[in-house]
Image: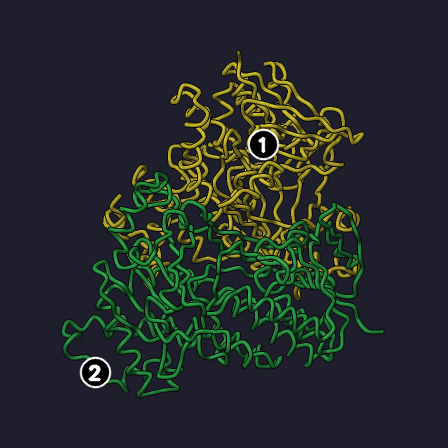
Chain colours: A green, B yellow
Amino acid sequence: MKKRIAIVGGGLVGSLLAIYLVKRGYVVNVFERRHDPRKTDLYAGRSINLALSTRGLKSLEEVGLAAKIRQEAIPMHGRMMHNIKGELSFLPYGKEGQFINSISRASLNVMLINEAENLGAQYTFNHRCTHVDLDKTTLTFQDEDHHITQKQFHQIVGADGAFSAVRGAMQFTDRFDFSQDYIDHGYKELTIPAGHYGSFQLEKNALHIWPRESFMMIALPNPDGSFTCTLFFPFEGKKSFDALKDLSNVEKFFQDQFPDAVKLMPDLLKDFQENPTSSLVTMQCYPWCKNNTLLIGDAAHAIVPFYGQGMNAGFEDCRILNKLLNETHDDWSAAAAKFQTQRKPNADAIAKLALDNFVEMRDLVGDPEFLLRKKIESHLHTLFPTQWIPLYSMVTFNENIAYADAYAIGQKQKKIMDEVMRDPNITTTWQSLPFQQIVDQLNL
Amino acid sequence: MKKRIAIVGGGLVGSLLAIYLVKRGYVVNVFERRHDPRKTDLYAGRSINLALSTRGLKSLEEVGLAAKIRQEAIPMHGRMMHNIKGELSFLPYGKEGQFINSISRASLNVMLINEAENLGAQYTFNHRCTHVDLDKTTLTFQDEDHHITQKQFHQIVGADGAFSAVRGAMQFTDRFDFSQDYIDHGYKELTIPAGHYGSFQLEKNALHIWPRESFMMIALPNPDGSFTCTLFFPFEGKKSFDALKDLSNVEKFFQDQFPDAVKLMPDLLKDFQENPTSSLVTMQCYPWCKNNTLLIGDAAHAIVPFYGQGMNAGFEDCRILNKLLNETHDDWSAAAAKFQTQRKPNADAIAKLALDNFVEMRDLVGDPEFLLRKKIESHLHTLFPTQWIPLYSMVTFNENIAYADAYAIGQKQKKIMDEVMRDPNITTTWQSLPFQQIVDQLNL
């Protein structure tokens, strides 16, 4: 008899995992709390986009979807910084030819669901998981009409996101570590519409940042010529969502802070008023498996969005789990145990990196010393391509370096660069630095 | 109209708070999930005892109960260490006349409930809180017969412990930080019965420790001549509860590790088999108040037991809250806001100290260098009684130093002592140390 697997959550990670598992020959049932995104506009007109990079693409390649998805994506080769005068400067993400990809969450989700269904996965929408029996591997669901159903499986995978119901059940078992940590900033989505004939009103192939030290706005391109902007802003304080409750202050604030953007935002006040202010949380837990139930993706490790790695980490989870199922000949209990010990340090590392990167994006990218540091690191990388890989590149462009290793190497590199930057003449003399010696210090 | 206050949880902290609040003139209702401890033996024959120290006593003094409670308590003047050969050494807790108090949880709880009821607090037992409406300040309870009742109050206080239902309701509100962290050790309670005619078979006025590096056993005296022992032991590993699943290994293990104790434990195997193995958790959260609902004691900050401060911190919470109600003329919203900003850093500090103290108790107290360090610190304290107070004394005997301050001063002292201890001749020359200079470094 074929093993019957339930995946709770038909979002990006749940659907990619469904594809992996039907390909392995399992009977796969996916249960999703929300409507079928192919039948309704899930995001109520809002166009959330994500940054797909090497780790995510590697998994999509394994299941044969990378080429198709690349067609829907817009390459972003670097960060375009907008200063308060509206002046631009560009910081490449990596080497020539390295880029991350702006992709719509909705269209990516639909592609994955279609592929999973075509391969034989069974989707059930509008089903909210209300109970998980971890001893009997049983799920209870409530549908739109409040009908209750209960189903038993051989294995359950919770891919139901940051506020996972499956994790909720685990949380009541003894010795389950768990934390949820909110940051002081919230976010709100805004829009820069397309120009005439679908033209892009800002550089198309970049991730735009308006870094303002304690807060920032970013913008990612959409295929229709528009940009989705996100304001990351403190909830409370002098400059905060609280202080902008009076709409009359909003326009002045944007005029002062983002003068070049505000000209391109005709619906600013409407967007600001109608779009929600959302919070940002890091969720960590352990263990990730209990009997025949396993957590994956955001359900196991939800992070803040500032490294663009949430989805990529979740897609990497799917690839690693599939690899471990190969290695264990589909012994789920062994694979799940290995999965959690292997992935947990990496999930913790990317959680820290994502928090750190918020400071980098909103503050440091506006700092000339920081930009010089990046320049020196990039030069080191050119001279010693395998010995000195900048942290961002390890995380974003190199799926062979685990997040935890990237974090550790990044710490070493930072110490060395701190030393290098203490040279009082660094701005004028950096090209004559003893580069070989600098790299030797790494001692990798 | 008098303000109606609901306290969820009629344990130690909930009952002390009830006393404070009826004295302020509130109508106080206490709801307790368990049976009335005056009518049933709540602890099923187990005799849990606690270490009551200055912070706890200060609050009990304010409500006029300290003298009565001292009569039930057994002073413990220091730690009595038992090495693997059964040899004893004694480390005083503080100066002459300073001690902590072994007290039975059950009898302390009964005293507090009686006092609260006498003063007019209304207790309702066998009522489990199943829902908290934070907007309407409404509580829902389920009794033994599964009857559901709902009641509205002006103010709710959650004093319902580490697994607080009130905090559970807060956890579903946006931007609520929460963590639960289990340590790798569990604990099991065992007994050394009284000797002939209720005599104590070990030194009565001490807290006994069998430190064994990776684990330990402790024993606290009871008024009836018995000792309650607690084995703190890893769940998994070579020496662990897992490895002692076979009862035949238990006796040999105790013979090897605690030869002097095992002679006094005739019911060891029965106790070991019948008493549960329990886990140890640190719970942290923030904020502690939402609308008219406030968390206090373990519900806000549950810690591991190794500093003997869980109850003391909870009793201190009650005293501080009462003080803030004085200062704000019973403006609960203002008092609760001040309470959480003032108490949160202290709760976090004692949580860390409690974790650190486990290492000290199970490992360091067996180390001659550590004991010398303690001796030097104690000497410094004698020479400079207000400038150098050992960390343990600040935490345990000085309610005027907040936990967070004690932690910070302790860190400074540790740095200085690390330096002092690096002197290669320290064991022979410590009495000629430049003590004034050492204290000057503190720079308080």
The image shows residue B103 at horizontal and vertical percentages of: 60, 32
Residue B443 visible in image: yes
Residue at (53, 44) in percent of width and height: B79
Mark 1: which amino acid? Answer: Ile
The image shows residue A343 at horizontal and vertical percentages of: 57, 69
- The numbered mark 2 sits on a residue in which chain? A
Q: Residues within 10 Å of mark 1 (few under 14, many from 20)?
A: many
Q: Residues within 10 Å of mark 2 (few under 14, many from 20)?
A: few
- The numbered mark 1 sits on a residue in which chain? B
Disc 2 target residue: A433
Whether the residues at callouts 1 and 2 have beta carbons within 8 Å, the answer is no
Q: Residue furthest front?
A: A197
Residue at (40, 19) in percent of width and height: B329
Residue A2 image-quadrant placement: bottom right
Q: Residue furthest right?
A: A1
Residue B298 image-quadrant placement: top right
Q: Circle 1 sits in a helix, a strand or a loop, which is it?
A: strand
Side of A263 relative to B366 (left or right): left
Tell me the quadrant of the picture where the N terminus of chain A can be found.
bottom right
Mark 2: which amino acid? Answer: Leu
The image shows residue A42 at horizontal and vertical percentages of: 58, 56
The image shows residue B197 at horizontal and vertical percentages of: 73, 31
Residue at (31, 37) in percent of width and height: B386
Work out whether disc 1 and disc 2 sit on a shared chain.
no
Side of A130 relative to B346 (left or right): right
Q: Which mark is residue B74?
A: 1
